[in-house]
Amino acid sequence: MAGGAVLLSVLAGCESTAYPPFPGPLATSTAPPSASATPTETPTPTATPTGELPTATATPTGDTGLGRRLFSFNPATSRFQLVGVLGLELVSKSVQGFLELEAGPADPIEGTRSLTLIDASPYIEIVLDTPIGDTIVCIELLTGSRPAADLGELACGPSDLGGLDLVQDHNITDVDPTCETGTPDTNILHAGVCNGVLQRSAIHSDDGPGAAAIGDPDTLQETIQVASSVEQALPCGDEQVEKHVNAFALVTGLSRATILDQNNFPGRTLQDQRRGEPFDCGRWTEEDGPGKFVFVGPLIDYDVDGPGNLLPIDALSVFELDD
């Protein structure tokens, strides 16, 4: 997966080589010439056909990768937040889970390293503090079989691995009355409304060595999806509840999300952003070392407290995952 533009270099000019001076005239013999053998015909050298030129191959560097990093979420410094829910401050009390990532060899051109998800906790388990008591938010990682290769990239030098900007419009009926480009709103209060598709754009910046992204930096498509649900108690996964599948990405740079026409109110905008922290490639295998992933994503018509408790509303989900 190529993370940035390829810089082509042209080397011009060659150093001239200094040769030693000619040692002078050869010594002349004074003895009379002796009889010489019959001269033989000197064969003319014939060029041996070589066929096609050999293909240049890269010299092995011995780079086998940086190894594995157990990225376990620190419950005290990791945080999940729902922004825009009726003006409430909904922040997690704890966030639990882990990702085990492997950084492969550096790409010979880009210099970035492919990230493979070796293992992960089945759920990111979140205890969310709400006015009506604790709510258990369960985030299930939908990655298929593991190890899952090429889920992202790590840059140990300058790169264009930056951040991610997500924008979604709740109501595009004014520009798409037949909803050809969007999806019909499922909220019973928003009959005839067309939800816009999620728009992605890169936030280009050089966040320095250690920048990383779980996601495709070229297409901006998420390489992981998650199924989110609300349960009554921990552990996650042992209750029969409705699940919502959402896009998911993680960056160490800036993550920003915007909902236009929030809750189907024309002109109302909801926006938030978070910035992560680069890794230290020299301490990549060190658990609890430098590095923080962030993600801010839009939720359209989301049942914040589970089906039947609150009307579906628009909110932003904010992840700050630190080990």
Image: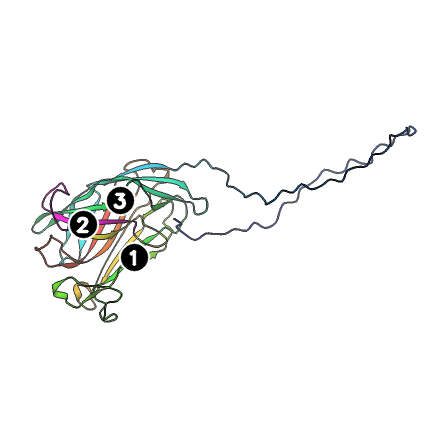
The residue under label 3 is: 144
Residue 62 image position (x, y, % from top left): 45, 35
Q: Main secondary structure of the magenta part?
A: loop
The residue under label 2 is: 228
Q: Secondary structure at mark 2?
A: strand
- Side (left or right) of 200 relative to 300: right
Of mark 2 and mark 1, the one earlier in the sequence is: 1
Can you say which quadrant of the picture contains the C terminus? top left
Tell me the amino acid under the disc marked 2.
Answer: Ser
Q: Secondary structure at mark 3?
A: loop
The structure residue drawn at horizontal position 16% and vertical position 63%, both measured from the top left corner, is 263
The residue under label 1 is: 165
- Side (left or right) of 148 relative to 137: right
Magenta span of residues: 222-242
User: Are the residues tagged 3 and 2 within 8 Å (C-beta)?
Assistant: no
Q: How is the image coloured?
A: rainbow
Of mark 3 and mark 2, the one earlier in the sequence is: 3
